[in-house]
Image (tube, grey):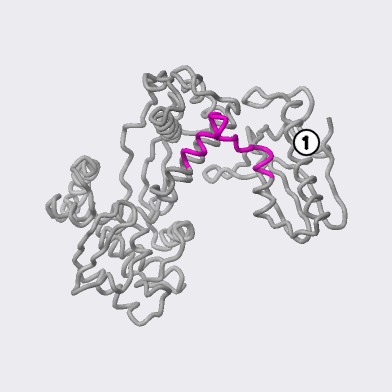
Amino acid sequence: MQIHTVMNKQRKLNFYPEKRKDTKTGQLKTKNVPIYLFFSFDGKRFQYYTGQRIDLSKWDEENQQVKRNNINSDGRTATEINSELNKVRVYVEEIHKQYTVNKKNLTIEKLKYELNDRLYPKDDASQETFFGLFQKFIDTEKVTWRLNTVKRVTNSMNHLRKYKSGLTFDDIDETFFKKFTEYSIRTNGHKNATILKQIKNTKLFMNWATRNGYTTSTAYKDAKIKLTGVNKPNNVIFLTWTELMHLYKLKISKKYLEQVRDVFCFGCFTGLRYSDVYNLKRSNIKKDVIEITTIKTSDALKIELNDYSRAILKKYKDYDFQDNKCLPVISNQKMNDYLKELGQLAKLNEKEPIITWQGANRIEKTFFKWELLTTHVGRKTFVSNALFFNIPAEVIMAWTGHKDHKTMENYYKIIGTQKQREMSKFNI
């Protein structure tokens, strides 16, 4: 079977394996890379991951397909992969033709929705199929979930569907989870921590299905999956007080980076999560105290201002932000990108080892601190420095909303190391 590029004056359709360089080595990734569809139509450009993967050396660029007599790392043959690619092509052409004939405007969003619906049709929940009920579970519970939780559980469902589209409740046992773990490592390159979350989300659904009488299968409850390293905490990434003061006082010529710095430092001086800084309104500031109900946990917190958090709020007091917000907070994704640029500018070049596990393989990589900066580092910086200043844990927990000392244990360990490092400065 050959998959030819479809072209006319208004549209162009082809397939290509992703060509992306490894961010650490700078080398082109050549093994088990995703195959994408590219479809341009009516002045629009649509890119879509087909769910298929192949080594670059096994791809036939001219004929837009996997070379004959090849298999991918998941054991799928060239015939199977090419058949799936052809299915995607046919569906895209059918959808475009349908909208064109009916003189309807086909948007990128509509095309993606229609294509997903054909490739991964939602099962009729009334037939009590596994994925139909999984979707019903999500739709039922999402009213009480945060958006990120909805996305994570939906992703878990989609990974299960790609692994085996005809799953039944009786399939979910210890053997299934072991095979799913092997597949997730081999095909998706997932780390153990990610796989464990997917297994937990699956069990969460199975518990719901059991409670609601959709299944009597209990084999999943006895499944014991041991994944190395998932319960071993990684390094806590935070800024020392010296690093924080350097960043806070840094002269920055680019306005967007200056604002990102101010917002990040505000989190470092208050312990607020990004979501709470984003939603912080001027009405939340009362008599030098932040009074806020947190987005994630709905905790009612009172956080006293200090000189630094007070100065940042004062800097923006005359700005007219939407919804009477206090600070110029951008999206989390953009802010995380800019934080790395900011960290480079501030020369936060201390090296930090990060350890992950993939199956039984221990993977240790070393990063510059600026590479690891995210909005959540602000909260970690607040807790770490508060402990360093010998502020009682109970007081810190009252500010941050932590419920017990277990979440503080990782901080206690690094504070000892930090104090030793700081004391060594006297040895001159």
Going 76% across and 54% down the picture, which residue do you hit?
Answer: 40
Q: In which quarter of the image is residue 91?
A: top right
Q: Is residue 410 above or below residue 373?
A: above
Q: Which of 4 and 308 is in front in this view?
A: 4
Q: In the rendered structure, which segment of residues is drawn in magenta?
A: 115-138
Q: In which quarter of the image is the C terminus?
A: bottom left
| Relative horizontal placement of residue 170, taking residue 218 as reference (left or right) | right
Q: Helix, strand or loop at disc 1?
A: helix
Give the residue number, with chain letter if any, for mark 1. 86
Number of labelled discs?
1
Going 52% across and 44% down the picture, which residue do you hit?
Answer: 24
Residue 127 in the magenta stretch? The answer is yes
Q: Quadrant of the N terminus?
A: top right
- Asked whether the viewer can see residue 216, the reply is yes
| Relative horizontal placement of residue 147, taking residue 113 as reference (left or right) | left
Farthest residue in the bottom direction? Answer: 318
Residue 17 in the magenta stretch? The answer is no
Q: Position of residue 344 (x, y in %)?
A: 43, 59
